[in-house]
Image (cartoon, grey):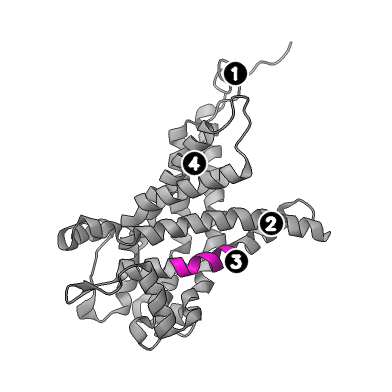
Amino acid sequence: MAATASPAASGMDGKPRTSPKSVKFLFGGLAGMGATVFVQPLDLVKNRMQLSGEGAKTREYKTSFHALTSILKAEGLRGIYTGLSAGLLRQATYTTTRLGIYTVLFERLTGADGTPPGFLLKALIGMTAGATGAFVGTPAEVALIRMTADGRLPADQRRGYKNVFNALIRITREEGVPTLWRGCIPTMARAVVVNAAQLASYSQSKQFLLDSGYFSDNILCHFCASMISGLVTTAASMPVDIAKTRIQNMRMIDGKPEYKNGLDVLFKVVRYEGFFSLWKGFTPYYARLGPHTVLTFIFLEQMNKAYKRLFLSG
């Protein structure tokens, strides 16, 4: 007698049951938040490096390692996790929105016969989803930048936000709602650059490795291609990232902002700190990119497995 699939494991049409879209979006956000718990110290070091030497001042940190040891010495172990609540909220808003927009657009642009969108269309969907997610996540990004920057300031100049919600409330009350979206243009631009660079460089790197004859299409090839892609993505997006960081952390001086816009940041950094200062914090940014992606997928896989075992198994 032929085995039949149980109703819990299959739908009425015989197709395997999958988790609802809302659960997929939720798991995507939670996976990003889980990964953030592990890489938050690298985010803090990157932000401190990007603000070091601002306004033609002497650089506070010589290298990323010097920054990390200095923070640990001055602020303790808790200090390197400053801004964690903001990092978690950023993932909850940015990742969930990006995943939701991407899924909706991907399904709408899939052909009636089930043919998926082509490479260029997928890239455009990814960039659109990334930019939209970045816009939604900008308030959390502003709070994160300010919270991670606080420890480098003299005690009387610190903002002293207790957590991300305290930061958002105080920013709204003290500086107005529009300040929550300060730097949203470079934030969205960074998301577009990251998505475009990742897609193009990964496929190109993978093809290069396969053509070399030393690699076959396996996990080692994928890992190496990811590392090369991460290097290209970091190099391409860091100038936009430093503009975002400085704008979101800036104060008003005599009623005027320190920077007019992202281009003004780039010109001043090059003029007063040197061209290569546009890539300050390169090491922690690159070191964060790989582990965050890997950890996100690990957490996502585990949550999907647990959901199937608890709710979809027969």
- First-in-chain label (1 vs 4): 1
Give the amino acid type for the residue marked by disc 3 in the picture: Leu
Residue at numbered disc 4: 102
Q: Earlier in the sequence, mark 3 or mark 1?
A: 1
Report the front residue among 305 and 42. 42
Mark 1 belongs to which amino acid? Ser
Contact, mark 2 vs mark 3 (Cβ under 8 Å): no
Quadrant of residue 223 in the image? Answer: bottom right
Q: Locate residue 152 relative to residue 5 in the image: left or right.
A: left
Closer to viewer: mark 1 or mark 4: 4
Task: Give the residue type that dot 4 points to.
Answer: Tyr
Residue at position x 17%, y 77% in the image: 254
Alpha-carbon distance for marks 2 and 3? 13 Å
**Viewer-nearest of discs 1 and 2:** 2
Q: Which residue position is annotated with label 2?
A: 204
Query: Which residue sits at x=22%, y=78%?
Result: 157
Q: Is residue 233 magenta?
A: yes
